[in-house]
Image (cartoon, helix red, strand yellow):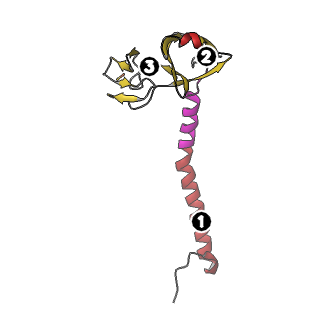
Amino acid sequence: MHHENENDTNLPNEVQVGSARRRWMKSVIALTIAAPFAVMSSLFTSTTEVHYSTSISLGNVDELFATRNWRELTVQKQRVLAIKTETGISVLLLKCTHAGCPLKVETNNIVCDCHGGTFSMNGQPVSGPPKLPLVALESRVTDGTLYTRIFGGG
Ligand code: FES
């Protein structure tokens, strides 16, 4: 009686050749399916490449946050929110993550007039259509000055 065996070494030569051919065909099929995705992936990567500006000074930290823990600023024509919390300082892009509308900073939250979305002051979506937090720009404090880098710069 012949038992099915996953180990081809006990099978006659013709069966082993057929099995090798099947493995080769599977590889060809897998490559045929995978290749377009690899090409699309590389295209996507190249089109989403982001160029950041050099560091831009937003000012002295003590002066920025002298009267309250946040400041609305404009950096290279983009509105941002610099906010100081117990975990540090963040610089958030004031652009809605739902459909890109400009945002307003109100008392204790950030509001989008387009579809009524709201965000907490640390940029987390609170209500309405936005599901993603606000974009946090790269930032650092050096010698008491807050610096950020914004995309789209040279
Ligand atoms: S663009 Fe802001 S809620 Fe739709």
Question: How far across and how far down the image is residue 72, in percent?
Answer: 48, 12
Q: Is residue 63 above or below residue 10?
A: above
Task: State which mark lies toward you, 3 or 2.
Answer: 2
> Is the Cβ of the residue at disc 3 closer than 8 Å to that at disc 2?
no
Residue 154 in view, yes or no: no
Residue 23 appears in which quarter of the rendering?
Answer: bottom right
The image position of residue 110, as x and y in percent, is 39, 20
Q: Which residue is mark 2?
A: 146
* Residue 1 higher or lower than 119, as above or below: below
Tell me which amino acid carries mark 2: Leu
What secondary structure is marked by label 1?
Answer: helix
Q: Residues within 10 Å of mark 2 (few under 14, many from 20)?
A: many
Residue at 57%, 51% (x, y): give it: 31
Q: What's the CA distance linking mark 1 and mark 2?
A: 64 Å
- Which structural element holds mark 2? strand
- CA–CA distance in space, label 1 to label 3: 56 Å
Tell whether 113 sits left or right of 8: left
Residue 40 within the segment the image draws in magenta = yes
Q: Amino acid at mark 3?
A: Lys
Magenta stretch bounds: 37-53
Can you see residue 131? yes
Residue in the image at 55% along x and 38% along y: 41
Q: CA distance from mark 3 to mark 2?
A: 21 Å
Residue labelled with disc 1: 21
Mark 3, secondary structure of its residue: loop
N-term-proximal mark, 1 vs 2: 1
Give the residue type at disc 1: Arg
Labels 1 and 3: the sequence-earlier one: 1
Q: Nearer the viewer, residue 53 or 46?
A: 53
| Residue under the point 55% across and 54% down | 30
Residue 95 - label: 3
